[in-house]
Amino acid sequence: MEQIWYQLTNFGTPALLQIVDVVLVAYLIYRIFLMVRGSRAWRIIGGVVIYLVLWFVTDLLELRTIHFLLEKGLVLGPVALVILLLPELRAAIEGFGKLGFWPDRLGGGEEAVSAAVIDELVTAVSELATRQTGALIVIERSRRMPEIEATGVPLNAKVSAPLLESLFYGENPLHDGAVIVRGNAIIAAACQLPMTVSALKPHMHMRHRAAVGATDGTDAISVVVSEERGRISVAIDGRIREDVTGQQLRDLLNQMLRAPRPSSDKPGQGDAKEGVDEAASVG
C-alpha cells in the first residue's frame, strides 16, 4: 500500500498529464455512448464495428480484393460518419450551452412563470385529454427558439385555458402545429417543430416525435396530448414520459418553472429528469 501511495504521489508532470488524458478520453467515450444509446446512431456505430471486423478478418484470411475495397472505404469513413451522425453531433454541440458556463442573460434568460399560468396550462391540457383532442405545447425556459417561433402565427396573448383549448379545436386553422409559451404569454401557434431521430414506442407518432425533437439540445418542456389515446405525455431533454396525470403535470411544471434556482444548476432539473427517466420511452 505504501508503495502504491509513493508511486501516486511521486509521478512527474508528464505522467500526471497522461493519466488526465486517459481519464478525459474515457469520460468522452462514456458520454458518447450515453448520447447514442437506443438511437439511430447506436445502430450506425454497430455497423461501423462490423465493418472494421470484416476489414480485419479479410486481411487475416488474405482476401485481397475484398480487403482492398474495404480499405478504400476507410478513407471516406470520417466524412460519412459526420454526414450520418449530423443530428446527434448538432445535439451534442448544442448541449454544451446547457453546462452552465454561460450567464443566462446571454441566452435570453428564463422568464418567470406564475402559478396561475401553470394552473391554466394544466386545466387546458387535462380538458383536451378528456376530449381526446390532440395538442402540443412547448414551454420555453432559458433558451429561446426564434427559429421555431418564426414558423408559426404570432399571438403574444396571455396564457388561458379557454384560449389554449380553442387553438387546438379541430376547426381552428391554427390547431395543426405547436403552441409556444414564453413566460406568461402564448408567443405563437401552429409552429413547426423538428422531428427527433430517436426511437419511440410504436404508438407514438408525429406529435410525440415533434415534442421530443423540440427538447433535443434545449431546456424546453414539451407537453403533448395524444389524439388517439387521450393521454398526456411530457418531454424533457430528449426523453418522454407518458401517462402523466394532471396533478403530476402541475407538480412537474412547478418544480421546473418555479423552483428556486441553485447557483450552478437549472431549477430542479436533476429531480425532474429523474421523473421523466422513470418512464422514458426513448432508447
Image (tube, rainbow, N blue to C red):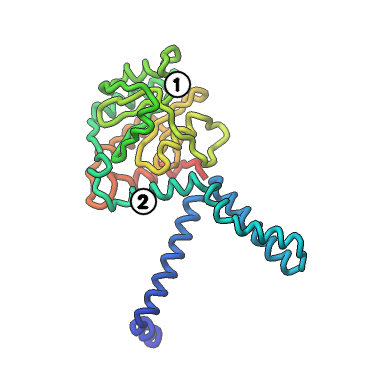
Q: Position of residue 273 (x, y in %)?
A: 38, 45
The residue closer to the viewer here, 119 or 110, is 110
Left or right of 139 on screen, residue 261: left
The disc labelled 1 sits on which kind of residue?
Asp
Vertical side of 40 occupied by 170: above or below: above
Which residue is painted at 39% across and 47% down in the image?
94
Mark sitting earlier along the chain (1/2): 2
Outermost residue toward the top in this view:
171
Q: Position of residue 117 (x, y in %)?
A: 26, 27
Label number found at residue 155: none
Q: Quadrant of residue 154?
A: top left
Vertical side of 85 occupied by 210: above or below: above
Instruction: Look at the numbered disc 1 and give the secondary structure of its residue.
Output: loop
The residue closer to the viewer here, 13 or 253, is 13
Vertical side of 9 occupied by 148: above or below: above
Which residue is painted at 53% across and 30% down in the image?
205
Number of numbered tags placed on the structure image: 2
To which residue does mark 2 refer?
A: 96
Q: Quadrant of the N terminus?
A: bottom left
Q: Position of residue 182 (x, y in %)?
A: 29, 31
To which residue does mark 1 refer?
A: 176
- Measured in 3D between alpha carbons, the distance from the residue under mark 1 to the one under mark 2, in whole angstroms, is 32 Å
The disc labelled 2 sits on which kind of residue?
Phe
The residue closer to the viewer here, 130 or 194, is 194
Left or right of 148 on screen, residue 50: right
**Crowd band around label 2 with a 10 angstrom C-alpha radius: few (<14), some (14–19), many (20+):** few
> CB of mark 1 within 8 Å of CB of mark 2?
no
Vertical side of 173 occupied by 125: above or below: below
Which residue is painted at 43% across and 46% down in the image?
91
The residue closer to the viewer here, 17 or 70, is 70
Which residue is painted at 36% across and 86% down in the image?
6
